[in-house]
Amino acid sequence: MKKQFHLLGIVAVLAVIFIIAGCGENQENPMSISNIEQQIKALGLESGVLEPVGTDVCASNVDDYNQGTLKNGNPIGAERSDPNNALGAVDGKFFSLGFNKNQDDTFQEEGGYIVVMFDDKYKGTVLTVWEETWGSYPEEKADVYISKNGSDWEFVGTATNKNSTANTRPSEFNIEGKCFQYVKIVDKTNPVIHSSTADAFDVNAICIKNAEKCQACEPLTTDLIAGQHTDVGSVTVWNSPDGSTLYVQYVVDSPWYLTEAHFWASIDWNDIPQNAAPGQFPYKEEFAEPYPTEYTFSITKEEGWDCGTQLYLAAHATVCAPGEGEPSTQFVQGIIATQTLWAGQNIDAGTVTVKVESENLVVTYETKDGWEMTETHLAVSETFDGIPQTKKGNSIPGQFPYKHENLGGVTVDSYTIPLSDFNIECGDMLYMAAHAALQKMLPGGGYQTETGWADGDDFPGNNWATYFTVTIECETIYPEPECETAWGYGDYTFIDYGIANKWGWFFDYTICCE
């Protein structure tokens, strides 16, 4: 931008003033600087017109407009109806917003409007709206809004022609910390106080003082350091364009993975929990298998977190990597079947439990309600036909390969059978038949005796013997992982700031709004 008057023009104006004042070499009371300023005002040349522009930027394009009419409803003159007159620096040309008159001769609360654009998004110290008024005139005013995108508007104030007595009159609005590209000016002039030919607020120029192009907000990325010295990934911090949400993303490199993440943020570093204990951080997450290699906290802004606010952050994680050595396969441990032990077909006398312990199959009979076992017989086979049976499909407990006889009346009996006795692979089934000779003491003496079978499917024969199946599953066992504490690297250490007597860092981040 450039000044509105050349230096020679200014000198000429001052010369005229001195001549008018009779200023000369022999003049006893030469005109003072303050009197010169008064004469400049009288000629309508004061205000910001003569001030150096510096880094000021003025609107360069018209995005939208809707011109009203004169107060009497007639069109506004052509010389005041070009919206481009509101662009660029102060130049004496202007665009009149006009009134919005209803058919019943009443007026709408808002008159005409104009939306102008700057050539880019800017921030600055002051937004100035210049209004054109010649001489003494009733108040004209307009509401002023700013926007980044031309659709979401923020009200910054009301411009008026009462801030100066010059022909071109500025209204200034504090815009520090704001970034925008669009300005909308909506007439709010009261038509009652104006003549019938009034045309409302006249926009000469819209400019930003000390303008700088808004810098695109860039995420902050720092290393994630494990065990004080190992770089295992990164922590990246950014915020939503309006500053309402803070995002913190942990990413770890292969072969590392995350098992825990803890995060703390505050406008005061003294607020960090005692000893920088991660378990006391307000934002935390514990992970289960499959363990992730990245995770993002989404944090709603807290009180005092505004655009331009500096935050102090501490980012902790527990990271692990697979241990050394090759993975191995083993049988899944634990109970794989629990069957009811039926006495005489329909009496619940206890259970038969099958579980895998190490490389063994452990089968346990256990009775209840006074029932005891005098014998147990167990068959385990890779096939159904491997269970001893008659040709007609009746089971033969006496020929079962595993048996305990002459037990004398016990309530618990177990078998431990190496799984290596069977030619099986992971996921294969075993067929089992569990028989018991049961007795229960009667109140008047003697015993009630019954045959017992573990619940299952019937054999093909005509007795009530039953069998059941179990599946032998496997799992992959990995070497014990190597786990480490990790912290996002920063400029401040816990030790240097007296927070904790341990290694670790915290760092700062400034909320950036576009």
Image (spheres, rainbow, N blue to C red):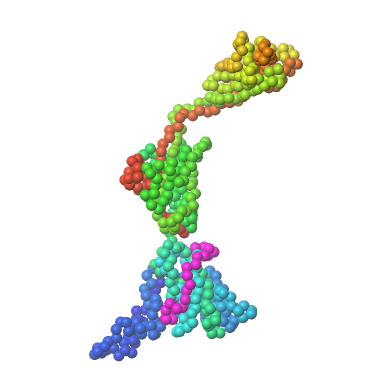
Residue shown at the point (43%, 45%) measured from the top left: 281
Reply above or below: 154 against 419.
Answer: below
Q: Quadrant of residue 426?
A: top right
Whether residue 300 appears in magenta in the rendering, the answer is no
Q: Position of residue 25 (x, y in %)?
A: 24, 88
Tally the numbered discs.
0
Between residue 330 and residue 279, name the one nearer to us.
Answer: 279
Residue 92 shown left or right of residue 404 in the figure: left
Residue shown at the point (53%, 83%) measured from the top left: 194
The quadrant in which the N terminus is found is bottom left
Q: Position of residue 112 (x, y in %)?
A: 55, 75
Find the magenta span and give its range: 148-169
Q: In the displayed orientation, state which residue is furthest to the top.
A: 406
Between residue 395 and residue 272, name the one nearer to us.
Answer: 272
Between residue 299 and residue 478, name the one nearer to us.
Answer: 299
Q: Position of residue 200 (x, y in %)?
A: 52, 79
Whether residue 167 appears in magenta in the rendering, the answer is yes
Residue shown at the point (56%, 78%) measured from the top left: 99
Reply above or below: 334 against 106.
Answer: above
Q: Position of residue 503 (x, y in %)?
A: 35, 41
Reply above or below: 164 against 452.
Answer: below
Instruction: Tell me if residue 382 can be seen.
Output: no
Reply above or below: 428 against 488.
Answer: above
Residue 403 shown left or right of residue 155 in the figure: right
Instruction: Tell me if residue 52 can be seen.
Output: yes
Residue 452 shown left or right of residue 361 in the figure: right
Between residue 276 and residue 289, name the one nearer to us.
Answer: 276
Residue shown at the point (67%, 11%) measured from the top left: 446
Q: Quadrant of residue 324?
A: top left
